[in-house]
């Protein structure tokens, strides 16, 4: 009874709270992506050498032997017909992102991941590996010492692994050899793509940009796009236009959303989530079954056999929980969660309560379960 009264007291006390404050102004550059200003993915297939016996097993990864033979042949070493099975090499995939406006000679970070049965890439060195884009052209070449993000220790009877030693990174490990053919300065119009499409946010971005230039240079075309007329801005180039508007601030509008992670028991509630008047009843049932068999012995000097008789005890226990609580319509969901948390309700039970409120149609928000 005290649990019910405490919950109702918390909900009544929070029912009269004022609505949450407006959103914090955010820069336009943090809300949108500019059309054409984007990275490009690169991938390559290479070889890591210098491993301390933790490389690929050649029998299980024949492609490692093939690429190793090709590299040695290009260096003038002929190993045709030789039985060459080292344990200090590993075949890897090398991935990177070519940033926008990257110029030849600049360096980018790369990620290296083993594709065979190598145990670890610790201490390995990536041999010169070309990186291709989706068009098949080579845009960068990677090489360098790998920094792996894990550790492994192994003995005769046991082993322990921390992190992922079969993947690592090479900071500034690739040098750009080819530039993208994109003439940004020749654009007459640029589209601003919102990362989280919303009509209200797009309208605010349009209004802020037009106020900055003093004329109608931006037009909202849909919830996720704002078109910008470069010629109407009367500035020298698109770069000058974006440099002027990307630091303008806008208060973004967001949808009411509740995100639940069942594995970790994490609940994230948006400030704009609201609930209708609803009554909640929750409790836990525990079923306990105990086996206590009894052995029955035959009488002395008889010809009977020992018999084991089953003896089962079954019981259902109901743990105390929230018997009945009425949630006021003026309360926000964050207030309800705070009240349940103050009463010691476990995250698992809280997730079940939120699911039930959503199923009842009283939760006015997007409910996402991970």
Image (spheres, rainbow, N blue to C red):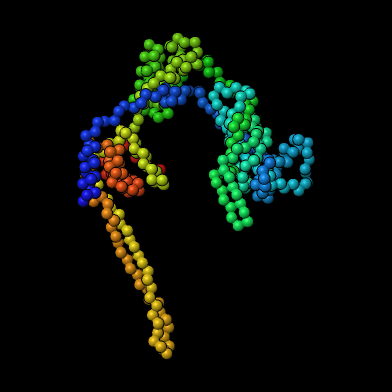
Residue at the image position 35 percent from the left and 70 percent from the top: 312
Residue 11 is left or right of residue 101, and the answer is left
User: Can the viewer see residue 178?
Assistant: no
User: Can the viewer see residue 72?
Assistant: yes
Residue 276 is left or right of residue 162, and the answer is left
Q: Quadrant of residue 275?
A: top left
Give residue 276's position: percent from left, percent from top.
24, 39
Residue 366 is left or right of residue 191, and the answer is left
Judge whether 292 appears above or below 54 on screen: below
Give residue 267's position: percent from left, percent from top.
36, 41
Residue 331 is left or right of residue 228, and the answer is left
Q: How many marks?
A: 0
Depth check: give the residue in front, 294 or 42. 294
Give residue 211's position: percent from left, percent from top.
36, 14
Judge whether 273 appears above or below 296 on screen: above
Give residue 17's position: percent from left, percent from top.
24, 33
Residue at the image position 27 percent from the left and 54 percent from the top: 320
Q: Quadrant of residue 310?
A: bottom left
Q: Quadrant location of the C terminus?
A: top left
Residue at the image position 53 percent from the left and 15 percent from the top: 185
């Amino acid at each position: 009874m005290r649990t019910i009264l405490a919950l109702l007291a918390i909900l009544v006390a929070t029912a009269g709270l004022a609505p949450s404050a407006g959103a914090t102004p955010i820069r336009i550059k943090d809300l949108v992506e500019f059309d054409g200003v984007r990275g490009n993915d690169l991938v390559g297939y290479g070889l890591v050498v210098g491993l301390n016996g933790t490389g690929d097993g050649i029998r299980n990864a024949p492609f490692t032997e093939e690429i190793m033979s090709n590299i040695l042949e290009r260096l003038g070493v002929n190993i045709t017909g030789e039985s060459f099975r080292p344990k200090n090499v590993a075949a890897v995939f090398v991935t990177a992102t070519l940033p926008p406006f990257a110029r030849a000679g600049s360096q980018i970070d790369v990620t290296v991941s083993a594709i065979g049965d190598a145990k670890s890439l610790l201490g390995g060195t990536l041999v010169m590996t070309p990186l291709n884009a989706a068009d098949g052209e080579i845009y960068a070449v990677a090489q360098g010492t790998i920094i792996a993000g894990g550790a492994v220790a192994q003995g005769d009877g046991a082993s322990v692994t921390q992190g992922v030693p079969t993947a690592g990174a090479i900071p500034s490990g690739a040098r750009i050899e080819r530039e993208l053919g994109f003439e940004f300065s020749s654009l007459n119009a640029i589209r601003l793509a919102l990362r989280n499409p919303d009509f209200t946010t797009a309208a605010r971005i349009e209004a802020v940009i037009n106020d900055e230039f003093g004329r109608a240079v931006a037009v909202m075309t849909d919830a996720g796009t704002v078109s910008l007329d470069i010629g109407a801005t009367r500035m020298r180039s698109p770069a000058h236009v974006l440099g002027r508007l990307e630091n303008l601030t806008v208060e973004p509008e967001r949808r009411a959303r509740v995100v639940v992670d069942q594995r970790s028991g994490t609940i994230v509630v948006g400030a704009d989530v609201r609930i209708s008047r609803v009554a909640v009843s929750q409790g836990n049932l525990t079923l306990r079954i105990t086996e206590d068999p009894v052995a029955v012995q035959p009488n002395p000097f008889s010809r009977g056999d020992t018999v084991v008789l089953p003896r089962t005890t079954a019981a259902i226990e109901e743990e105390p929980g929230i018997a009945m609580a009425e949630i006021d319509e003026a309360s926000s969901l964050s207030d309800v969660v705070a009240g349940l948390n103050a009463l010691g309700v476990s995250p698992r039970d809280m997730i079940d309560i939120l699911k039930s409120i959503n199923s009842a149609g009283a939760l006015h928000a997007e409910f996402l379960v991970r």
